[in-house]
């Protein structure tokens, strides 16, 4: 039985607009895959006789396997925003691996995958076109996920306790806005700064500094999209920015517009 994920996804930009244009489902994996897979996600849309919709996200520090008509592939961590053009009627299935968990499948430092894609057959014993069609032509969500899970299950590496450590470190950064520096994150993790940086380069594919910054930008985008009054000076201090100007610069560099412009667009739907 498919169990939906209850938390709100903070990486979806302009979520109110997205809700009008697509269906997003996030579902827990089977129990045996839970140490490796955080969740599955399905995006489905029917925009026939409508204009195409471009959906943007701020990716998390995770590797994904994505089944879609154009480019079914393994996606390393994407450091910039990710945009996908939706048109006609179709759906996409994604398998989001836990941060660090793809190291065992890849057999090499995950940094070698950052901002890159690989065909599924580079890691899994599958025919890329055949499994793409099998997943996307499956009759329902459960059948799609069952096929994808069979592929992942056949390639499971040995359990690695380092994955749980990385998950705990990232969860701590998400939960504690006072963690704004790599040395502080290393301290709460019980590691030296260089050890933490090496660990993230090997298992996560991005630096601890990138993760801290992305966590803060997720929170900014989430707050701005809720339609509530947001005092940017207060928010910048709460999230550890030196001032509002630094928050604005950081946000605009990644999202492509200022926080105020983003809030206007996100609450217009």
Image (cartoon, rainbow, N blue to C red):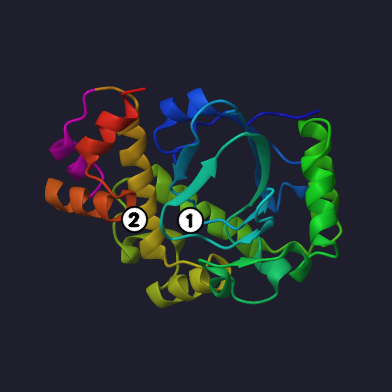
Q: Identify whether 151 is placed above or below 232.
A: below
User: Disc 2 marks which residue?
Assistant: 213
**Residue 216 appears in the picture as rendered:** yes
Q: Residue at x 57, y 28 (%)?
A: 47
Query: Residue 147: x percent and y percent?
Result: 84, 45
Give the quarter of the figure containing the C terminus: top left
The answer to which of 248 and 134 lies nearer the viewer is 134
Whether residue 237 appears in magenta in the rendering, the answer is yes
Give the quarter of the figure containing the N terminus: top right
Q: Residue at x 44, y 38 (%)?
A: 10
Label 2, secondary structure: give it. helix
Q: Is 236 left, or right, of 120 in this rendering?
A: left
Q: Earlier in the sequence, mark 2 or mark 1?
A: 1
Label 1, secondary structure: give it. helix
Disc 2 packing (10 Å; few <14; some 14–19; many ≥20)? some
Disc 2 versus disc 1: nearer the observer: 2
Q: Identify whether 152 is placed above or below 14.
A: below
**Residue 243 appears in the picture as rendered:** no
Q: Quadrant of residue 42?
A: top right
Q: Residue at x 85, y 62 (%)?
A: 126
Which residues are drawn in magenta?
A: 229-240
Count of numbered circles in the view: 2
Q: Is 179 left, or right, of 28 in this rendering?
A: left
Whether residue 174 appears in magenta in the rendering, the answer is no
Query: For residue 169, which numbered disc appears in the image?
Result: 1
Q: Quadrant of residue 259?
A: top left
Query: Residue 103: x percent and y percent?
Result: 65, 68
Q: CA distance from mark 2 to mark 1?
A: 14 Å
């Amino acid at each position: 039985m498919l169990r939906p994920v209850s938390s709100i996804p903070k990486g979806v930009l302009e979520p109110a607009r997205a809700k009008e244009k697509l269906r997003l489902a996030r579902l827990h994996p089977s129990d045996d895959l839970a140490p490796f897979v955080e969740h599955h996600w399905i995006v489905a849309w029917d925009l026939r006789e409508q204009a195409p919709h471009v959906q943007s996200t701020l990716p998390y520090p995770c590797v994904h396997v994505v089944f879609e008509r154009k480019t079914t592939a393994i996606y390393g961590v994407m450091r910039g925003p990710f945009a996908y053009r939706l048109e006609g009627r179709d759906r996409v299935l994604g398998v989001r691996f836990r941060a660090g968990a793809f190291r065992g499948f890849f057999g090499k430092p995950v940094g070698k995958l950052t901002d890159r894609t690989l065909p599924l057959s580079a890691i899994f014993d599958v025919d890329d076109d055949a499994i793409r069609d099998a997943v996307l032509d499956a009759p329902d969500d459960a059948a799609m996920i069952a096929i994808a899970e069979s592929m992942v299950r056949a390639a499971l590496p040995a359990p690695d306790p380092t994955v749980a450590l990385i998950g705990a470190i990232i969860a701590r950064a998400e939960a504690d806005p006072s963690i704004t520096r790599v040395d502080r994150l290393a301290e709460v993790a019980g590691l030296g700064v260089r050890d933490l940086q090496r660990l993230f380069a090997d298992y996560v594919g991005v630096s601890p500094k990138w993760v801290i910054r992305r966590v803060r930008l997720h929170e900014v985008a989430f707050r701005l999209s809720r339609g509530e009054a947001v005092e940017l000076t207060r928010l910048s201090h709460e999230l550890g920015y030196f001032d509002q100007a630094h928050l604005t610069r950081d946000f605009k560099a990644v999202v492509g517009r200022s926080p105020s412009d983003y809030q206007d667009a996100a609450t217009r739907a």
